[in-house]
């Protein structure tokens, strides 16, 4: 049986705005990264009424810029943080098997060893523990390899860079996609989701927060959303929102920049990912799709603009030097097809502490009566973070609220995925798609592939690939607008697809055709197409300029030059400076 999923389209947005202004919600969530959308899903599936506001697109903050691993965290094992590792491995198992098997996949890593006996014992026993803590239940066990065996798996490695290796497994996903599908699942259970809508202040009465004032960037007007409890999952922006009620700038979150580069698969001759120890941290070389490697990352303080942290030339050279130290054939900047940076929302331990030493645990705290915040954590454990945050919100509602059920709640597209996978040859016959295309679609949409196939049967022209958009079809662009909440060109080129980091022209070649399909879906005109194209080109030019800069300060200045008029121009703190209803003196300081 096929069933249609909730469509995050223009009608949904209009209805969400109407409801947001009219209703009082049990919970309002600020932030539509993985933590916020996870919280909206957790709340909605406990029977709570919930609205979520996101200033940009879903996952446009850190949740589209991570290393894209769902991992137990071997690094945390080394820090003796056993409970974090156990929890992360549990979440990894759930995501791989029941919650999101369409979006989360196992990935092999080779861990080259450079010291003879002690390192093999040390790494081997760490991985044995990793397996014993739940790792090996869903992925193959770690195994020891001689140098000859390791080089068979990764012939591109310099033989003298190792004395042998251990192979182990973790899992990976496309972070923007998983967040989007968690959001869509929340919408299925009645959550009201508004993207391109910033919280610009809080409402208060009787000494407690009673809602948020939001700015709709699409229409340019403000509305008030009433809430019994407000939760903030705004990642590195948490302190800005906190300052609205504390009257000063708190320092709970310390943004730490991490960059990744994307290389074509041909650059590294290896059939496995690599996990290479460096003097500071770990270098990850992760297979990305069928054609690329994702290589990261760095870990440095970032005190500049939080919307678009900029990779510098120095960051890129650092990664390449670590990679070239183990490769037979070195790679250079000209091989790179994409670069991106994200900010870890680390819980601060005071100045002077190195960011790579900070804990990846999360904390939940009350900023004011009626306003709870979550900071820190990692993508892998988003579900647990969301559950704990809603537990706190529920405790303030003054009525019994059922326990979280997200541990048993498949993400949209998971139910029926396995059955569809078995039928993939038949699915390919129907619209005339290659089986490999159907497999790719299944691993992006799960059983929601039915929606796309139905669209193709009504409009067969959408089965064709969009020139310059990699393997993506016209139907994926149309569906991103009709069901996945895409409102701007960047939403598709940067997050629904990844052409902005997967093609040497960074999506330039596909931009006009994509904007044209979008305009037809969204009811936009030629002026809109031209404006979107100009903005996207400015973005690419600013990114390229930043990548040439030697340091963070100059890269930040170069990147900021690329903000267009419809960018999230009003940061929360600018909103606060503009004055408004949130400066209620009844809120305890
Ligand atoms: C380089 C790097 C690599 C990483 N690798 C991994 C990994 O491999 N595995 C892993 O598990 N974790 C990883 N992480 C960590 C993980 O990505 C983050 O912990 C996670 O994505 C944070 O999600 P979030 O929802 O808390 O924050 P975000 O994704 O940043 O979401 C916060 C959202 O709040 C919105 N917002 C802010 N202010 C407002 C406002 N006033 N009104 C409305 N909305 C607002 C922002 O636009 C943003 O979208 C990595 C992080 C980085 C930086």
Image (cartoon, rainbow, N blue to C red):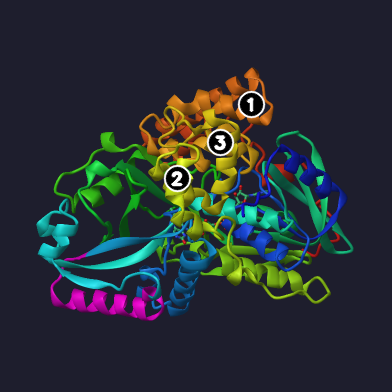
Could you tell me residue 366's position as x and y percent?
A: 70, 68
Q: Which residue is mark 2?
A: 438
Q: Which residues are magenta?
A: 112-136
Q: Is residue 501 magenta?
A: no
- Where 62 falls versus 275 (above or below)? above
Nearer the observer, disc 1 or disc 3? 3
Circles 3 and 2 in contact, beta carbons < 8 Å: no
Depth check, front residue: 466 or 129: 466
- Where 507 falls versus 165 (above or below)? above
Task: Quote the CA–CA distance across marks 2 and 1.
Answer: 25 Å
Task: Quote the CA–CA distance across marks 3 and 2.
Answer: 12 Å
Q: Is mark 2 within 8 Å of ligand 1?
A: no
Nearer the observer, disc 2 or disc 1? 2
Q: Which residue is mark 3?
A: 456
Res. 176 mark: none
Could you tell me residue 216's position as x and y percent?
A: 74, 39
Task: Identify the image quadrant of residue 574.
Answer: top right
Q: Which residue is mark 1?
A: 520
**How dense is the environment of label 2, judged by Cα within 10 Å: few (below 14), some, or many (20 and up)?**
many
Q: Image check: 344 left or right of 520? A: left
Say what secondary structure mark 1 lies in: helix
């Amino acid at each position: 049986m096929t069933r249609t999923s909730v469509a995050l389209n223009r009608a949904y947005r209009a209805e969400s705005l109407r409801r947001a202004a009219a209703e009082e919600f049990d919970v309002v969530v600020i932030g539509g990264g993985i933590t916020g959308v996870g919280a909206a899903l957790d709340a909605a599936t406990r029977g709570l009424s919930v609205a979520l506001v996101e200033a940009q697109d879903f996952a446009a903050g850190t949740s589209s810029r991570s290393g894209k691993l769902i991992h137990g965290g071997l690094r945390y094992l080394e820090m003796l943080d056993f409970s974090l590792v156990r929890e992360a491995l549990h979440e990894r198992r759930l995501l791989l098997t029941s919650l999101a098997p369409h979006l989360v996949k196992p990935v092999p890593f080779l861990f080259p060893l450079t010291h003879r006996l002690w390192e093999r014992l040390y790494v081997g026993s760490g991985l044995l523990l990793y397996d014993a803590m739940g790792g090996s239940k869903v992925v193959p066990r770690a195994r020891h390899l001689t140098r000859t065996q390791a080089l068979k798996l990764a012939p591109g490695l310099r033989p003298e860079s190792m004395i042998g290796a251990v192979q182990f497994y973790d899992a990976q996903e496309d972070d923007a996609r998983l967040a989007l599908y968690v959001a869509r699942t929340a919408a299925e259970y009645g959550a009201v989701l508004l993207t391109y809508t910033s919280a610009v202040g809080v409402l208060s009465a009787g000494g407690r927060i009673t809602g948020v004032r939001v700015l709709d960037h699409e229409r340019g007007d403000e509305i008030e959303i009433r809430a019994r409890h407000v939760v903030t999952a705004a990642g590195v922006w948490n302190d800005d929102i906190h300052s609205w009620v504390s009257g000063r700038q708190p320092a709970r979150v310390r943004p730490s920049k991490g960059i990744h580069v994307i290389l074509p698969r041909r650059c590294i001759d290896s059939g496995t990912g690599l996990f290479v120890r460096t003097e500071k941290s770990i270098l990850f070389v992760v297979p990305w799709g069928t054609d690329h490697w994702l290589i990261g990352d760095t870990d440095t303080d970032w005190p500049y603009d939080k919307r678009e942290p900029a990779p510098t030339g120095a960051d890129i050279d650092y990664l390449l030097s670590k990679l070239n130290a183990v490769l037979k054939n070195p790679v250079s900047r000209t091989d790179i097809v994409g670069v991106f940076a994200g900010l870890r929302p680390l819980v601060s331990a005071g100045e002077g502490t190195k960011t790579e030493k900070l804990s990846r645990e999360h904390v939940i705290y009350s900023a004011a009566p009626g306003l709870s915040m979550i900071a820190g954590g990692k993508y892998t454990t988003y579900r647990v973070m969301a559950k704990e945050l809603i537990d706190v919100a529920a405790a303030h509602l003054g009525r019994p609220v059922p326990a979280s059920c997200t541990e048993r709640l498949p993400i949209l597209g998971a139910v029926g995925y396995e059955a569809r996978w078995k039928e993939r040859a038949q699915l390919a016959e129907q619209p005339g798609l290659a089986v490999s295309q159907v497999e790719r679609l299944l691993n992006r949409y799960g059983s929601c592939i039915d929606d796309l196939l139905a669209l193709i049967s009504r409009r067969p022209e959408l089965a064709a690939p969009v020139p310059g958009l990699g393997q993506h079809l016209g139907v994926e662009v149309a569906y991103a607008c009709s069901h996945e909440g895409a409102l701007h060109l960047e939403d598709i080129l940067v997050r629904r697809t990844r052409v902005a980091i997967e093609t040497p022209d960074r999506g330039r070649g596909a931009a006009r055709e994509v904007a044209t399909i979008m305009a037809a879906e969204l009811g936009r005109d030629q002026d809109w197409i031209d404006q979107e194209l100009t903005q996207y080109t400015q973005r690419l030019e600013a990114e390229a300029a930043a990548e040439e800069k030697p340091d963070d300060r100059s890269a930040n200045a170069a990147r900021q030059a690329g903000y267009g008029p419809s960018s999230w121009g009003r940061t929360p703190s600018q909103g606060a400076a503009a004055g408004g209803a949130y400066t209620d003196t009844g809120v305890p300081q």
